Image (cartoon, coloured by chain):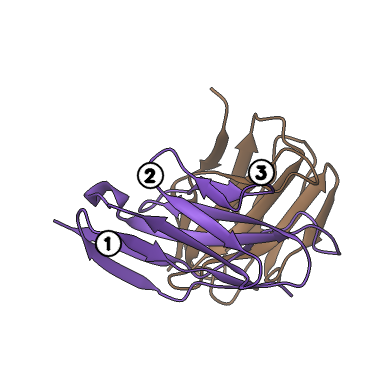
Amino acid sequence: AQSVTQLDSQVPVFEEAPVELRCNYSSSVSVYLFWYVQYPNQGLQLLLKYLSGSTLVESINGFEAEFNKSQTSFHLRKPSVHISDTAEYFCAVSELRGSTLGRLYFGRGTQLTVWP
Amino acid sequence: DGGITQSPKYLFRKEGQNVTLSCEQNLNHDAMYWYRQDPGQGLRLIYYSQIVNDFQKGDIAEGYSVSREKKESFPLTVTSAQKNPTAFYLCATAPRQGVYEQFFGPGTRLTVL
């Protein structure tokens, strides 16, 4: 079964500092990759996704993630965080073939806390 | 206003009672999913349905049941057989099989006393 590892459960940073949230997955087949964000007591919102093409994908609020096939990673970065970025971030993977077609597998999440 | 509705937002039940969580969508999406979220454990798939009148077990289906009689609705029943039902439950949809992005509802927090 697909496994998604988010290496840090909590990441505290100061406002305007850069941040990287790490995500690795285990799959030998082609995948789609996603980052979702969750604010307290809310559902998940899609932040960005990699389906094909350029391995660097960007969101509208300054986050970016790079798909690295050789390292099976999809790390999320932002060069300068704001207090409003405080939330939990989930990495998710979907395999493009096999019996699990259509399913998303989630990591355990990384709580990003931005301090003033 | 299009979207996914989960009601109620907060739900309290006594131990031993069955409870049904509602998930309604007007996005005309074919696929619907139920996840359970516990602190530090991410999202775990309970059940999913790709079309009306068909559904499959996810990774933690024991103690839960679902139905998919209408495209718009995918209710989840938490039965008394579920040993630890207190959790945050999320419903999600996807346009059709083969489209992998999922859209999430606001969630229902179930507390069993």
Q: Label 1: which residue?
A: A113
Q: Quadrant of the C terminus of chain B?
A: bottom left
Name the residue located 19 percent from the left edge and 55 percent from the top edge. A15
- The spot of residue B25 in percent (x, y) is 64, 34
Q: Are marks 1 and 3 in contact (CB under 8 Å)?
A: no
Q: Nearer the viewer, mark 2 or mark 1?
A: 2
Picture colour for chain B: brown
Classify residue A94 by image quadrant. bottom right
- In the displayed structure, B10 sits above or below A61; it is below
- The spot of residue A5 in percent (x, y) is 55, 74
Type of the residue with mark 1: Thr
| Chain letter, disc 3 residue | B
The residue tagged with tag 1: helix, strand or loop?
strand
Q: From the viewer's side, name the closer residue of A60 and B22.
A: A60
Q: In the picture, which chain is purple?
A: A
Horizontally, is B43 left or right of A15 in the view? right
Horizontally, is B40 left or right of B76 in the view? left
Residue B18 in view here: no
Q: CA distance from mark 1 to mark 3?
A: 29 Å
Q: CA distance from mark 2 to mark 3?
A: 26 Å
| Chain letter, disc 1 residue | A
Q: Nearer the viewer, mark 2 or mark 3?
A: 2
Type of the residue with mark 3: Thr
- In the displayed structure, B108 sits above or below A71; it is above
Q: From the viewer's side, name the closer residue of A42 and A48.
A: A48
Q: Label 2: which residue?
A: A62
- In the displayed structure, B66 sits above or below B52; it is below
- The spot of residue A47 in percent (x, y) is 49, 47
Crowdedness near tag 3: few (<14), some (14–19) or many (≥20) residues, C-alpha within 10 Å: many
Q: Label 3: which residue?
A: B93
Name the residue located 48 percent from the left edge and 65 percent from the top edge. B87
